[in-house]
């Protein structure tokens, strides 16, 4: 473990690291569709939706002349394509909105709330997520996430792993990068943060993608800390 004694704030990847997006969405949509009398392969749709997540943000990067587009809008665009692709019939405008807002109703991993609450006693804690501010705020209220503030890619108009997100978070906290620790279940997120001087902590979420998980089973970098869950992270950070 590296020296992390100077760390004053922890910022967190959210989708997959703090919340279980896949199980949350599948269960949410299955229950909702049963009441609506709509039949669909929600598991396939949710997996397909997440599969185009990175590509949707790349479109924003490639077309800066069109301005920044928040994740809610990207999610909706992707959903409309997937609904057509999977030939899901009978969805109204209200239905499409409800499904899109499913990302606001994600449940935390079992260790997340207790671990974050412990970390909050000593450190400033915040998401640093590609989710937009409203999404992250609503999710925090829904899942009981005890953030001190909400930091989103939307504030910097850059999606991770663009440098502007990590450096922007440190700037808003009035801290040098080395006093901020990025916590994630994704090695590529930590790699981008580490290059910019942030401290790093890896927490594995080996069931994030269900049976389709292909990577991030373990730490694949020289991270400052590796923990099995947020409880262990809190303990090792002195909380």
Image (spheres, helix red, strand yellow):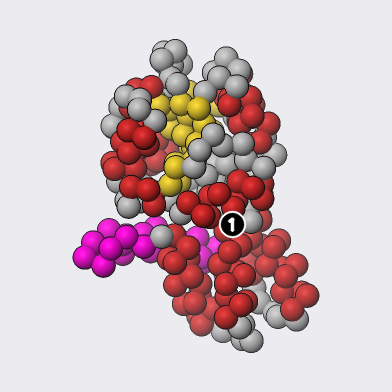
Main SS class of the magenta portion in the image:
helix
The structure residue drawn at horizontal position 70% and vertical position 39%, both measured from the top left corner, is 110
> Which region shows up in magenta?
46-69
> Of residues 236 and 144, which is closer to you in this image?
144
Q: Secondary structure at mark 1?
A: helix
The structure residue drawn at horizontal position 61% and vertical position 83%, both measured from the top left corner, is 92
Residue 212 percent location from the top left of the image: 55, 55
> Going by the image, does 157 lie left or right of 134?
left
> Of residues 119 and 55, which is closer to you in this image?
119
Quarter placement of the C terminus: top right
Residue 88 percent location from the top left of the image: 60, 82
Q: Quadrant of residue 188?
A: top left
Total numbered labels: 1
Examine the rendered structure and indicate whether residue 3 appears above or below residue 152. Answer: above
| 57 within the magenta span | yes
Examine the rendered structure and indicate whether residue 149 appears above or below residue 86. Answer: above
Looking at this view, name the residue that lies furthest to the right: 35
Q: Which residue is mark 1?
A: 104
> Of residues 212 and 155, which is closer to you in this image?
155
Looking at this view, name the residue that lies furthest to the bottom: 90
> Going by the image, does 7 lie left or right of 233?
left
Looking at this view, name the residue that lies furthest to the left: 65
Residue 136 percent location from the top left of the image: 53, 50
Examine the rendered structure and indicate whether residue 83 appears above or below residue 107. Answer: below
| 82 within the magenta span | no
Say few, some or many: other residues with alpha carbon within 10 Å of mark 1 (under 14 / 14 to 19 / 20 or more).
many
The structure residue drawn at horizontal position 54% and vertical position 78%, both measured from the top left corner, is 83
The structure residue drawn at horizontal position 43% and vertical position 32%, both measured from the top left corner, is 182
| Residue 226 in view in this figure | no
| Residue 126 in view in this figure | yes
> Going by the image, does 186 lie left or right of 39?
left
């Amino acid at each position: 473990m590296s020296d992390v004694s100077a760390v004053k704030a922890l910022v967190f990847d959210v989708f997959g690291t703090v919340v279980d997006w896949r199980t949350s969405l599948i269960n949410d949509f299955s229950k909702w569709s049963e009441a609506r009398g709509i039949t669909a392969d929600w598991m396939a749709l949710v997996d397909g939706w997440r599969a185009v997540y990175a590509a949707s943000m790349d479109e924003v990067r490639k077309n800066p002349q069109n301005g920044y587009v928040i994740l809610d809008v990207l999610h909706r665009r992707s959903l409309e394509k997937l609904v057509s692709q999977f030939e899901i019939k009978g969805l109204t405008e209200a239905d499409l909105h409800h499904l899109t807002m499913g990302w606001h109703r994600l449940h935390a991993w079992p260790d997340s709330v207790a671990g974050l609450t412990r970390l909050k006693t000593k450190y400033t804690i915040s998401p640093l997520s590609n989710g937009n501010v409203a999404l992250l705020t609503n999710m925090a209220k829904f899942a009981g996430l005890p953030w001190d503030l909400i930091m989103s890619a939307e504030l910097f108009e850059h999606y991770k792993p663009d440098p502007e997100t990590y450096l922007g978070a440190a700037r808003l906290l009035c801290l040098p990068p080395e006093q901020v620790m990025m916590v994630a279940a994704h090695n590529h997120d930590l790699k981008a943060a580490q290059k910019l001087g942030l401290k790093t902590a890896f927490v594995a979420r080996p069931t994030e993608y269900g049976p389709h998980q292909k990577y991030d089973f373990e730490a694949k970098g020289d991270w400052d800390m590796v923990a099995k869950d947020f409880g262990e992270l809190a303990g090792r950070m002195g909380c």
